[in-house]
Image (cartoon, helix red, strand yellow):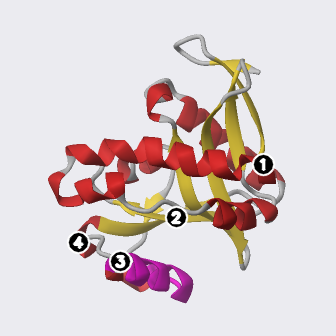
Amino acid sequence: MASDDAHVLLHFRKATGRDAPLLTETEQSAGLLFRADREIAWLAEADNISPERYGEIIADGWSWVAESEHGRLVGFIATTLEARDLHIWEFDVHIAWQRRGIGRRLLQRFIAEATAARIPAVTLTTFRDVPWNAPFYQSIGFEPLAPEELDARLAAQLAAEIEMGLPAARRCAMRKVLPV
């Protein structure tokens, strides 16, 4: 258990299959913040990752959740091992629990676990200009990748997101190299 600035006691643990529906629910809640950005406000109502897909991601063994002291799931990080790197597919904190340092602490815990397992890097795709996206990740040591630095997997992921309607100029891939 740990306490953040708002004196919220948290417990971090690996996600289990029974968490999958709660991840979809938490993703939906966190996505409501996109309503503030006219260009991407539609994301607040867009489909989320299904509980079935979350179950598959969780089965990879690298997803973590944050629970309140009362056992309520308040945030999660859903990741899979892709070749040698871990890839973050989704990372959310329930809207009612945001701005308390929960996401930062959860991501730091995840990075510590990945480092201990000698994973060389963590990757993700995100919005380059949304404050709780690329700027947040940069504050934890993630670096944006230039187009020529993208491997085939990340290039394909960005292309799929653009095909789905996300604005190309606002998307980026990022990587955090871990000490091995």
Image spot of residue 75 (x, y percent): 59, 38
Which residue carries the number 1 mark?
18
**Near-viewer residue (64 or 165):** 165
Q: Do the residues labelled 2 and 4 touch (CB within 8 Å)?
A: no
Image coordinates for residue 118, horizontal then vertical, percent: 80, 61
Q: Which amino acid does label 4 sit on?
A: Ala
Residue at disc 4, secondary structure: helix
Q: How crowded is mark 4: few (under 14 residues within 10 Å), some or many (20 or more)?
A: few
Residue 152 drawn in magenta: yes
Side of 179 where 171 appears, left or right: left
- Which residue ends up furthest to the bottom in the rendered image? 152
Q: Kindly identify the residue that appears in the image at 52 percent across and 38 percent down.
A: 93
**Which residue shows up at 39% across the image and 83% down it?**
159
With respect to residue 114, does 93 lie above or below?
above
Give the Cα separation between the discs numbered 4 and 1.
37 Å
Q: Which of marks 3 and 2 is nearer the N terminus?
A: 2
Report how far apart the C-alphas of labels 3 and 2 lie in the structure.
Answer: 17 Å
Task: Read off the residue under disc 3.
Answer: 164
Residue at image location 52% in from the left, 64% down from the top: 124
Residue 110 within the magenta-colored segment of the rendering: no
Give me the residue at 22% from left, 43% from top.
Answer: 36
Q: Distance between the residues labelled 2 and 1?
A: 25 Å
Question: Given this view, does label 3 or label 4 mark the residue nearer the observer?
Answer: 3
Residue range in magenta is: 149-162
The dot on residue 169 is 4
Direction from residue 113 to residue 134 in the image, left or right: left
The residue that label 2 is drawn on is 124
Q: Earlier in the sequence, mark 4 or mark 1?
A: 1
Residue type, numbered disc 1: Arg
